[in-house]
Amino acid sequence: MISGRILILVVATGILVAVAAGLATARLALQLEASESHPNNEGTNDDHGDDDTHKTEPVDDHDSDKIELTEAQVALAEIKTVAASPATVENRLNLVGEVTANRDRLVEVVPAVAGIAREVHALLGAELQQGDLLATLDSRELADAKADWIAARERKELAKANFERSERLWKKKIAPEEEYLDARSKLAEASITERTAEHKLRALGLSRAELRSLTNGEHKPYTRHTVRAPIGGTVIEKHITKGQVVDGERPIYQIADLSVIWVIVNIYEGDFRSVEVGQRASIVTKAYPDRKFEGKVTWLSAVVEEASRTLRARIEVPNEDRALRPGMFITAEVVVDQRTASTAVPTSAIRRADGRSIVFVQETPGIFEKREVQLGLLSGSNVEILKGVKSGEIVVTDGSFILKSEAEKSGFEAGHGH
């Protein structure tokens, strides 16, 4: 029993000795490491004075934003530069809208007389010149009007001959004055009737040449009526077929000159004051994503649309190649502000980093500085710089991605160096 206790005490004593030895060894190692880290720390502070060995050098953040590349690296990265300079910049308001036909260049063709369509010449989508034949009708109304004019013309000729005879006899004192006056009155009445019948035919669309053809022996049906295009343009609607009865009240064709079209856009209330008549606008469509159609604001509605609470505006756009078609949905970019920026750079020079806009300025060949900039108006391929770059400084336009990567790597290494 006693021998067992003695054994336990011996073992415990050995463990304590081992722990103590380990602690001593560790303390010694720490001391050695400290002495190696500070080899000049022996003695007193009086012996060394102000020792700069223990001071931490401040980090120059400005220098950390500089990237230096060799000539070969610059060539490999295909870095291109351009000088910041003044430029015209624009503020554009994006609006949605729809292409419509120009209502000032659109005509609904209504026949002047009722009748039956004998021939239909113009088809839907046809391109027409002014005066082109659209359709031919047979009209009893027209035949009656022609007959009335021919009869009135004949009565006028008879009244004229009778008046001339009466006038000669009256001047020779052979016929009484009453007979002469009566003949003159009948001629006047016949002339009025003839002119009225002629005006009626002219109102029905007959030209003077067609009127003359009625009396020069040409044998044409009195019922024949031709409908011609009043303007040049495109047939966008057609409501007539051969053999159809036409009432002379509803349009049979709709013709639009699409060389200049309208774009109707909707302006929200917060933008009412921004849009004015005369402002330039660019039209963008999904059908032609790489093309912009230039136009001008020509009208603003006087009232707000009740349902949408928007203001309608009209943009007139030249459309010589007929690329824009009524019914297309578009986006309009209206230039609501334009000015000359004192400093502008290409948009390709701008990079985003940590939510900031940055550019790389070339100080000397191969040395570039990363700078944060404040952007102004964006106009096409240029962007206004309000702060960060001055006009005349050289900025990187192509290859800045490589510089951005180098700057991020340098920042990472600097952050782990302390």
Image (cartoon, rainbow, N blue to C red):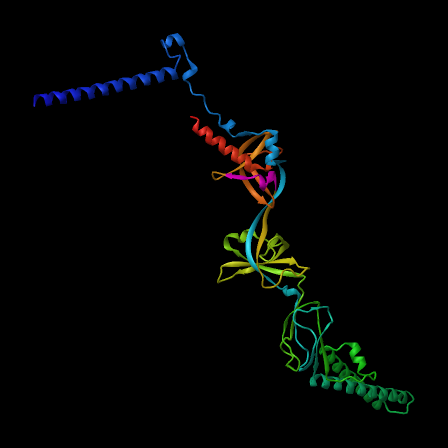
Please determine whether, in this image, residue 356 is positioned above or below residue 256. Answer: above
The residue under the point 59% across, 32% down is 73
Q: Which one is nearer the viewer's eye here, 65 or 91?
A: 65
Percent x, y of residue 279: 61, 52
Q: Which one is nearer the viewer's eye here, 252 or 32?
A: 32
Tell me which segment is drawn in magenta: 340-352
Q: Quadrant of residue 124?
A: bottom right
Percent x, y of residue 80: 62, 36
Relative horizontal placement of residue 8, taking residue 101 as reference (left or right): left
Instruction: Assign the N terminus to one quadrant of the image.
Output: top left
Whether the magenta-drawn stretch holds residue 347 is answered as: yes
The residue under the point 40% across, 9% down is 48
Instruction: Assign the C terminus to one quadrant of the image.
Output: top left
Q: Which one is nearer the viewer's eye here, 180 or 100?
A: 100
The residue under the point 78% across, 79% down is 210
Percent x, y of residue 147: 75, 86
Whether the magenta-drawn stretch holds residue 306 is answered as: no
The residue under the point 74% across, 81% down is 196
